[in-house]
Image: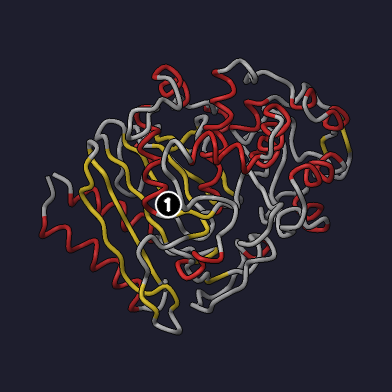
Amino acid sequence: MINFDRKNVIQEIADSYVNRSLFSGIEWVAEKSGKMVLSGKSGYQNFEQKKSIPENAIYRIYSMTKPITSVMALKLIERGKLRLYDPVSSFIPPFEKLKVMNPDGSLEELNRPMIIEDLLTHRSGFTYDFLMGCHVAPLYSERDISDNGNKSLEEKCEILSELPLAYQPGSRFNYSVSLDVLARVIEIVNEKDFGDTLKEEIFKPLNMKDTGFGVDEKNLSRLMSTYGASNFKEIMNVGPHKLEETDVSAHNPYDSETFRRGGTGLFSTSEDYLSFARMLLSGKSKSGETLLSRNMVEFMKINRIPNTQLPLMLGPLPLVGYGWNLIGRTMLDRGQMMSQTGKNEFGWAGAASTYFWVDPDEELIGIIMTQYLGSMWPINDDLRVAMYQAIE
């Protein structure tokens, strides 16, 4: 049931963010026990032009691409085509020669091979350009690892094979390009373009008709404007929060025939992503088609990060209370949380302030969509708490 007085709180919070010129347009949906219980929107598709948010607005979901890539890997594991303990170098041979660079610049050999589980849990030793304090991140920036949308997955992995790892595989959680590498592995195993694989194996059975690595010309009128940082290097250091439209097409083009990524890059809608998140509860589509077995759904939700590697760190920011499963973050200890959530909630977020969570105990799914790259405002915490308190 919904407390309709409290439902208004969600709208008030969203409106407040828009009225303070912090976000242009915000959308949210929640589904409980298979029924839509909350939905709404606030603001504009384009803040300067005051264009209304269209029906089925299309968003750049950035790292909310990662759980989709992970599910595709799990599907291949269930078919016996991939295993968590497979060495990544058995698919991408140059990775066999990877070395680890220490903070002092010295290089050392790998203690053990990087494996598929390392990619799924960000313990591969790879990094991201924007992670402040990571000694290898500047090398990624020099090679334009994240901001060049013209490189194919194969070309991106070729560059990564020439750079050192930041840490020994398995030794620590370090948010990274691991899922881009996993997408390349999926291409190799499946002998098919990664975008085509996702379309056939996930988007079609889940009726995610507006999700993909680009936007058709006929649908551009539904694409939301993007604000904040214009590239990945600025995400952690964007300065004052200003609602100025930015062009992100260099790293996230909407019209490229070759742009594919496993960790970012997808375009989607709240309705489409709700369909994906719903599947994470049971492994089935709304029509009953099985994408993941019941046992795999339970298996994928288990935390894989040892206590010695907690709390998870995203650059300088701790993700307290959470571990990491085969999909994304997973709640381990609500006693460490500073905002309300479910005791077994899991999910992830995107760099442009998109966010989703799945609460198996409540059979609750929440999706929050907006487009500001690199915001530090707690919009997702605020809306998630408001959505929980509206459900009785």
- Amino acid type assigned to the residue bearing label 1 in the image: Tyr
The residue under the point 47% across, 39% down is: 204
Q: Nearer the viewer, residue 312 or 262?
A: 262
The residue under the point 82% across, 55% down is: 143
Instruction: Identify the image quadrant of residue 334.
Output: top left
Question: Residue 378, position in %: x, y?
Answer: 40, 60
Question: Residue 6, position in %: x, y?
Answer: 14, 58
Judged from the image, the secondary structure of the residue bearing numbered disc 1 is strand
Question: Residue 65, position in %: x, y?
Answer: 54, 46
Left or right: residue 356 versus residue 244 is left
Left or right: residue 128 versus residue 288 is right
Q: Which corner quadrant holds the N terminus?
A: top left
Q: Nearer the viewer, residue 309 or 52?
A: 52
Q: Residue furthest bottom?
A: 49
Q: Residues within 10 Å of mark 1 (few under 14, many from 20)?
A: many
The mark tally for this picture is 1
Q: Nearer the viewer, residue 337 or 353?
A: 353
Question: Residue 94, position in %: x, y?
Answer: 86, 32
Q: Which corner quadrant holds the C terminus?
A: top left
Q: Mark 1 highlights which residue?
A: 355
The residue under the point 27% across, 61% down is: 40
Instruction: Identify the image quadrant of residue 331.
Output: top left
Answer above or below: position of 45 versus 146.
below
The residue under the point 65% across, 40% down is: 194
Answer above or below: position of 116 versus 140.
above
Q: Nearer the viewer, residue 212 or 319?
A: 212
Q: Residue furthest front?
A: 218
